[in-house]
Every structure is written in C-alpha cells, then in structure tokens.
Image (cartoon, grey):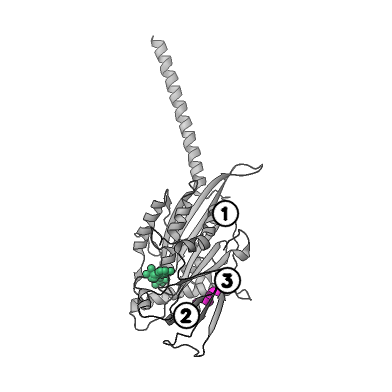
C-alpha cells in the first residue's frame, strides 16, 4: 500500500478491516456474512441475514476490491505496518498525512486508531508516536480536538471555549486550539490519555462505550536540514499528521431519549456531509463539494481531495445481523477509492514554522550573549587598569 508523493492517483487509499465476532455474537453463534478472498478482495452476502428485514429476499452476493483488506485475525501491528507506516514516513519528509477510521458503531474504529497504549493491542496513534520519536532530529507538537453536536472543543485544554471557531483562511484550523511541544513519546501518551478522558462516550445497542464525538489527533513534525545545491542555507519542512476516529454511524432510534437523538442527528450531519463530499469528489460531473456544510468536513478539507496522503480505514463486523450496515459501509468505501488527492512537500517559505521562530530566537540570544561578553570583557579591562593605577 505504498503512497508516492505528488502522484494524485496514489494519494487516497482505502482499506477495510473486518472485526471478529464479539463475545456476545460468538456466544449467540451469530452467523457471518463477510468472506475474505484475498489481500484485496472480499465478498458480502445476505444468506444469513434473514433475521432483519432486507430489501430483497433473493440471495445476493457483492464482491469488492480495495487497496487492502484486513481480516478478523489481522493484528494491530500488521495493520500499522501496511496501511499507516508509509504515511508516517511521508509526514517525516514534510507531507501532510491522514488516517481516518470510518464505520458502523462498535466495529473497531477506536480500537484501530487508539487501541491500547502499551503492548500488542497498541493502535495507530501510539505506534505512529513511537515511530516518530525514533527520529530525534524532529520538533514534535500535538493537538487533540473533538467535534460533538457540531461544536469543536479542545481535548487538551478542557477549560477553553467549548465551541472553537474555524479560521476562514488556514485549511480548516480552529482558532485557539492548544498545541503542545512533546520531547518524548511518553509526553504524547500522557496528553492522549488526558484528552481521551474528556471525550464524550455513551452506550449504543452495538457498543457499551461508544464514542459520540469525532476526534482528530494531530501531530506536527518539523525538521530543519541543509539545502542541497548552490542556493545552500537551511530549509524547514513541516509534516502534519491527522489521526481521525469518527463517531460511529448508527440507526436513528425513535425510542431513545432526546439527548441521544440529538447526538445521533448531529453525528449524522457531519457523517452525511462527509459522505456527500466524497460523492461529489468522485462524481463524473465534478459537482461542488459541500465542505462548508459540517465542521468535520471543514477540518478535513485537505484530507479529502486536497494536499494530503490519506488512508481511510473502513471498519465492518463479520456478523450477519449487520449485513445492511456493512454493505452500506463497503459500498461507500468502494466509491471513496476514486477520490484523488495531490500531496505536495511543505517547505517553510514564510518562516512560519516553530523551528524558524526558534532559529530567530537563538540568533537573538546569541547576539545578547555576545553583547554581555563584550561588556564583561570591558569591565575586566577597566578593573585591570584601575588595579594598575592603584599600584
Ligand atoms: N479487530 C478487532 N479485534 C478484536 N476486538 C476488536 C476489534 N475491533 C474492535 N474490537 C472490540 O470491539 C469493541 C468495539 O470497538 P470500538 O469501541 O473500537 O468500536 P467503534 O467503531 O469505535 O465504536 P463507536 O463508533 O461506537 O465508538 C471493543 O471492545 C473493541 O476492543
């Protein structure tokens, strides 16, 4: 699943991850409906989905081909190595990268993006952080936001405004979002754990601890190197990595309480706009993409059809009872494969990078030090002269 900088066709990739039956489904001996055929192909059928009303009672099977398919036994480390590490490598070179988990509630988005902080079950974020910190020559800063009920809040500064506005210019960045410089992986894990505590969760029929907000964890890496060739001088590259855990798509349940219904409606606003943007980007007529219709799509504007190397990981379950939701997710993922992104190297031409401002600060401090040394020297010379005269 390699991404190549600049090549539009390879900059948006789609993987599917099929989660195993959970304990409840396994103990109920739930039948399955997804079959993996190869590393890139799967089929889904309605043969065992009879318990739920389906549009057609005739047996149907759909076959889909993706950039990569991860089966129920695929490990967190397999998924990271194949679908995510190439993006992290590009980010370290100065490209924008995104990994987005999309799928029905309870199918493994949070498990994939976060997972555990330690051990084999570590998800994408801790593995990416570990990879980044093996390269000590980078300056790393992180931010973490959630979108809940169409409001953006800072998960790393919970006391701040709970409804951050998005900058009109600046690629969907919210005003006032805190950024934290991290010197080692442990710094990031602490921030991640603190932010995770602030995230809104609730119980859905599919998932006891369901994320009710969309969460975007961003890691910015800056690197300063000597420019090759005659021009010489220093060049600072800035790579930005968005790791996105979307709230799950869930059927609207009329019986649920008002708060839950509002949440579901708002999750659906952002998700349906996300869907509409993907549909318009992949339509033959190049319709206008409605990025501005939801907070999520404004923040992810570069990620979808813009300057970014993106992998969308669509999660589905094996269980036949969810045939219709899984089919909808798989069809969407198949369509998303036609999104085209154009990733370009981000060099700091405007000296906006933190490293550039550090450089300026270092120059200022050096000048101050030289001045202080000069004054000290002059003082010493004067003291010596006085001593001579006193003799
Ligand atoms: N590939 C997998 N292997 C083993 N367990 C998994 C896998 N994917 C998910 N699970 C388990 O299934 C449960 C639900 O997963 P998770 O919370 O990640 O779902 P989600 O898609 O983020 O749901 P929501 O949208 O409701 O937040 C968790 O207990 C998780 O550990």
Along the viewing direction, whichever of 255 and 379 lies nearer the viewer: 255
Q: Overall secondary structure of the magenta stretch?
A: helix
Please determine whether, in this image, residue 375 is positioned above or below residue 5.
above
Q: Which residue is the extreme one toward the left?
A: 257
Question: Does mark 2's beta carbon lie closer than 8 Å to ligand 1?
Answer: no
**Residue 249: x percent and y percent?**
44, 75
Q: Is residue 336 magenta?
A: yes
**Residue 159: x percent and y percent?**
34, 59
**Residue 245: x percent and y percent?**
44, 66
User: Which residue sits at x=38%, y=11%?
Assistant: 390
Could you tell me if residue 84 is visible in this image? Answer: yes
Mark positioned earlier in the residue sequence (2 or 3): 2
Mark positioned earlier in the residue sequence (1 or 3): 3
Closer to viewer: mark 2 or mark 3: 2
- For the residues labelled 2 and 3, the Cα–Cα distance comes to 22 Å
Q: Can you tell which mark lies on residue 33?
A: 2
- For the residues labelled 1 and 2, the Cα–Cα distance comes to 44 Å
In screen coordinates, is 300 left or right of 184? Answer: right
Q: Which residue is mark 3?
A: 337
Could you tell me if residue 168 is visible in this image? Answer: no
In screen coordinates, is 136 left or right of 40? Answer: left
Closer to viewer: mark 1 or mark 3: 3
Q: Is residue 380 magenta?
A: no
Q: Can you tell which mark lies on residue 195?
A: none
Along the viewing direction, whichever of 101 and 40 lies nearer the viewer: 40
**Which region of the structure is painted magenta?**
329-338
Q: Secondary structure at mark 3?
A: loop
Q: Secondary structure at mark 2?
A: loop
Q: Which residue is mark 1?
A: 346
User: Where is ligand 1, by quadrant?
Assistant: bottom left
- For the residues labelled 1 and 3, the Cα–Cα distance comes to 25 Å
- Quarter location, residue 3: bottom right
């Amino acid at each position: 699943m390699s991404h190549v900088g600049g090549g539009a066709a390879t900059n948006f990739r789609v993987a599917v991850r099929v989660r195993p039956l959970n304990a409840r489904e396994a103990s109920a001996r739930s039948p399955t409906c997804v079959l993996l055929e190869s590393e890139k192909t799967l089929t889904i059928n309605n043969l065992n989905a009879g318990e739920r009303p389906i549009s057609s009672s005739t047996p149907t099977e759909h076959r889909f081909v993706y950039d990569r398919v991860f089966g129920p036994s695929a490990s967190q480390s397999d998924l990271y190595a194949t679908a995510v590490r190439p993006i992290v490598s590009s980010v370290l070179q100065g490209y924008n990268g995104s990994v987005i988990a999309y799928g029905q509630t309870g199918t493994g988005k949070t498990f994939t993006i976060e997972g555990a902080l330690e051990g084999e079950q570590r998800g994408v974020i801790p593995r990416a952080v570990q990879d980044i910190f093996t390269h000590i020559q980078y300056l790393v800063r992180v931010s973490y936001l959630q979108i809940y009920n169409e409001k953006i809040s800072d998960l790393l500064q919970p006391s701040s405004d709970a409804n951050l506005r998005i900058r009109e210019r600046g690629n969907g960045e919210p005003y006032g979002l805190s950024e934290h410089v991290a010197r080692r992986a442990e710094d990031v894990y602490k921030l991640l754990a603190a932010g995770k505590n602030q995230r809104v969760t609730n119980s859905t029929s599919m998932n006891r601890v369901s994320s009710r907000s969309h969460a975007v964890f961003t890691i910015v890496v800056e690197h300063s190197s000597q420019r090759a060739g005659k021009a010489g001088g220093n060049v600072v590259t800035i790579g930005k990595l968005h790791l996105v855990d979307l709230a799950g798509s869930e059927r609207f349940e009329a019986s649920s309480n008002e708060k839950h219904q509002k949440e579901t409606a708002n999750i659906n606003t952002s998700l349906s706009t996300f869907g509409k943007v993907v549909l318009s980007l992949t339509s033959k007529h190049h319709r206008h993409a409605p990025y501005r219709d939801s907070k999520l799509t404004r923040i992810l504007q570069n990620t979808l059809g813009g300057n970014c190397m993106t992998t969308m990981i669509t999660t589905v379950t094996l269980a036949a009872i969810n045939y219709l939701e899984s089919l909808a997710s798989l069809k969407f993922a198949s369509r998303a494969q036609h999104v085209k992104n154009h990733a370009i190297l981000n060099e700091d031409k405007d000296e906006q990078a933190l490293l550039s401002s550090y450089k300026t600060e270092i120059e200022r401090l050096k000048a101050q030090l030289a001045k202080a040394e000069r004054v000290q020297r002059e003082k010493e010379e004067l003291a010596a002269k006085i001593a001579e005269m006193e003799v």
